[in-house]
Amino acid sequence: MIDHTSLLNSGAVLKKYKRGEFLFREGSIARYYYQVHQGEIKMNNYNQEGKEYIQGIFTKEKSFGEPPLFADFKYPANAEAIVDSEVWQLPKEKFLKLLEENPDIHHKFTSTLALRLYYKAIMVSEISTQEPEHRILRILDYFKKNSNPNTLESNTYKVELTRQQLADLTGLRVETVIRSIKKLEQKGELFIKDRKVYR
């Protein structure tokens, strides 16, 4: 998202997080801009029964948790490392100054936030009204569209998400995800090789 030189010049620090470690928790005050350098971070919530709902998964060069930096509200979700990760951390004031002084970065950033809002709106509609197979294809197509083009083999996207993560992203049970993936494979919408899903 923001190039490393600009981050460093603005005072960003590269921090390491172990798998399962929280970067921030739901309800805490937003003080930093975060951008993944290496690894994977998920933003999630847990309901009263302890079931996890994943808001999003962020990989290399992706940023997360920015809206509270602009509107001064508390984090609506947790941020947790899925694997050992390295994340750029830039204080809020320095981040806002960086955007102010770099209109091109600001524009790119605004476009990214708009795409995320679009994704959220689509997913709310999907989860409340659509069949499991349709929900899964939507989420896979979203990740395919937003993946690094260099990772695509002949326009085929390798899904790095686990069946459990797909369930947590779509509000489905993991058993339903497994059954739906098999049906989608039979319909030719995706294929499975060495237990990995390809779209």
Image: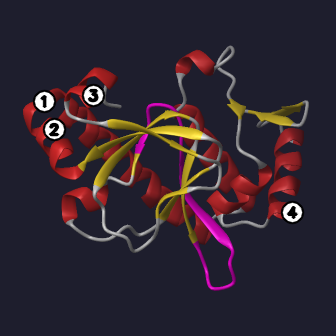
Residue beneath disc 4: 175
Element type where label 2 sits in the image:
helix
- Which residue position holds label 3? 8
Residue 187 place in picture, x, y as percent? 84, 40
For disc 1, the marked residue is 102
Which mark, residue 3? none
Badge 2 or badge 3: first in the primary sequence: 3
Q: What element carries label 4?
A: helix
State which mark lies toward you, 2 or 3: 3
Residues at discs 3 and 4 in contact (Cβ within 8 Å): no
Q: How crowded is mark 3: few (under 14 residues within 10 Å), some or many (20 or more)?
A: some
51 vs 62, left or right, is right
User: Is tag 3's residue or tag 1's residue first in the polypeptide sequence?
Assistant: 3
User: Which quarter of the image is occupied by the N terminus?
Assistant: top left
Image height check: is 89 above or below 52?
above
Query: If you read the primary sequence from the N terminus, does the residue marked by circle 4 or circle 2 appear first?
Result: 2
Q: Which of marks 1 and 4 is nearer the N terminus?
A: 1
- Residue range in magenta is 46-63
